[in-house]
Amino acid sequence: MAETPQSPAPARRFDPLTAVAVVFFLMAVAFAAAPAINAGPATLAGLLLLVGLAGVACLGLFVLRSTLEPAADAEPGAERLVEALAEPAALAGADGRIHASNGAWRGVLGDGPRLPKGGASAASLFSALGAARRGETAHATLRAAGVDHAADISPVGTRRFLVRLRPAAPEPLALPAGALEVLTAAAGAKAPPPKVLDAFAAASPFGAALLEGEDPFNAVIVEANPALAGMAGPYSRGQAFGDLIEAASRQDAAQRMAQGAEGALEVRLSRDPSKIAHLYLSRTGGRWVAYLVDVSDQKQMELQLAQSQKMQAIGQLAGGVAHDFNNLLTAILMQLDSLAARHPVGDPSYEGLNEIRQTSNRAADLVRKLLAFSRKQTVQREILELGELISEFEVLLRRVLSEDVTVDTEYGRDLPHVRVDRGQLETAVMNLAVNARDAVRAYGGTTVRIRTARVSESEAAALGYAGAQGDQAMIEVSDDGPGIAPEVLDKIFDPFFTTKPVGEGTGLGLATVYGIVKQSDGWIAVASKPGQGSAFRIFLPVYAPPAGVAAPTPLIKPKTVARDLSGAGRILFVEDEDAVRGVAARLLRARGYEVIEAASGEEALELAELHAGEIDLMISDVVMPGMQGPDLLKQARQYLAGAPVMFISGYAEAEFSNLLEGEDNISFLPKPIDIKTLAERVKQELNKAA
């Protein structure tokens, strides 16, 4: 086993009283020996004089050496700990000479060689040093530059004292536990770990505190760093540490600690319960060391990430549900077209069929909202002037909002162009305006305001879009209603979340707005305070035409409608949903087309090879079991001889457009589809190919 290092014996030091006694003893010996050596009076006097001079010389040499050399028990480790103490501190001898001091001491009392004393403070210091020699922690007054400083004096070893200045406080501060053991550790021996806040903890950016007591939450604060006050607010020494933590959070943390929880305890601070901190506790001897780390920003990021993941998951679910529901709606709408041909106006069944059609259209609108929320709606973007867009839409908006609500519009100057889907943006503004109308009615307000403006990057950041890059086009819809409660502000864009009474809201209005704005590469921000109304701001990137190309004038293209829906040609219709494929093929045949049906991609490929060069148009679903629509096109293109291909799907075109890169003569028709729309598009595609 390795030997335990032994502390060296303390060095012998010169004692003036002992030296004087030795000189007198030698003189007495010389005087007594004089008769024995027959020394005369002159010889005896000379001998005594020589002994006295030798003694005085030795005394002087020892005193000089004692003054110039450092004390043997002023260990380097003790000096380092004195330097690390936060309060002014010095290591002094029994004669008042200072052997070591820290920067705080020198800043207050200077770098004098001795403890300052004068007048009444001299008696105070003498009395305190006497008490310290007896092993007590004494208190004294040190006078420097006419100012009295209260000091605590603690014994260190047998002839050294730790002197610390203390601030004006009702009670003197006790020396931190463990400090004396460190100061008196022998040279070469391993000192025990310090039990005071070291320089690192004192200067750290997180809160640190030394606590005394059995229970850390009821323990009192002995010492703390400045960062703790910055986090938890003002406190006083001797105050219970648990007072800095919010009551419910403190109880929960204490319970988890009692159950043996390890690592960080998550707590909320009494000063501001919205602030979240991680509490780390460590037991050292009879005291606790507590560290508080502010993790509010980290928790906010975690919540935002969780919200984003939740929205993404719900979006995927909504997109899948919408796809399947669109297939069912397509079958319903086409069957209605078939029945309507046999039950025209005046037939007893006509009213019932019309109600079914209206209900189906409402269901289709609900599906469009789901797709808009999941950002999987088919987008048909065009370049629009922001002011003209809102101005044209304002006429319809005033009809939707009741007469008891005033619509106040404000158009800014130099309004930019934006590249968006007109229908989607109108839907977003309409949803915001309807919500504002309902809020105004409930609160007794009167006005819904719509404002458009071009804002700079810095202005957008100040209005809630911190990530803005370049100028933004802003549409603001605000009201003077009751505002939004802070506890629900983070949930308003969640699907199916609503604060309206049962039966008055679906909870999809703001979720739809959120999806539309995101799909348009924009941002939506909310500013609301209870009792002060709400303001929803949509930010859209300003459209910048390529260099050297003037911004195009927005045009509204008239929709081309085929009057005669009959035609001729061979169509390969590929659809895995039997209800959709069967009724669509039957209705197309009724309009003069020859339809070849295929229930899968593999079957369609065989039929395309069988009728190679004879197919005029292929209509295919995108998502099917086995071979997908884009894969079918790539393999069947050699048999189609340049015939146009039309994809139909409940998903958005953007979901698979990257799979069709390099393909020509491709079109897309989103579900749900009625037979009129399908027949119009079929005739348009065949006419283009002719």
Image: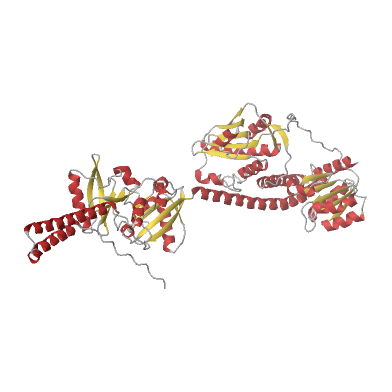
Nearer-the-camera pick, 446 or 300 = 300
User: Is residue 415 positioned above or below 637 on the image?
Assistant: above
The x and y percentages for residue 224 are: 37, 50
Quadrant containing the N terminus is bottom left
Query: Which residue is farthest bottom?
Result: 1
Query: Which residue is farthest top?
Result: 413
Residue depicted at 33% across the width and 61% down the height: 185
The x and y percentages for residue 231 are: 42, 47
Nearer-the-camera pick, 333 or 495 = 495
Q: How many marks?
A: 0
Quadrant containing the C terminus is top right
The x and y percentages for residue 397 are: 64, 33
User: Does any portion of residue 460 appear in the rendered image?
Assistant: yes
User: Does any portion of residue 245 appear in the rendered image?
Assistant: no
Q: Would residue 587 be found to the left or right of residue 184 on screen?
A: right
Q: Would residue 71 be found to the left or right of residue 366 on screen?
A: left
Residue depicted at 84% across the width and 58% down the height: 602
Task: Kindly indicate the quadrant of the structure image that contains residue 475.
Answer: top right
Nearer-the-camera pick, 370 or 227 = 227
Nearer-the-camera pick, 573 or 541 = 541
Q: Would residue 462 be found to the left or right of residue 597 on screen?
A: left
The x and y percentages for residue 278 are: 46, 54
Q: How is the image coloured?
A: secondary structure
Q: Would residue 221 be found to the left or right of residue 539 on screen?
A: left
Task: Kindly indicate the quadrant of the structure image that contains residue 8.
Answer: bottom left
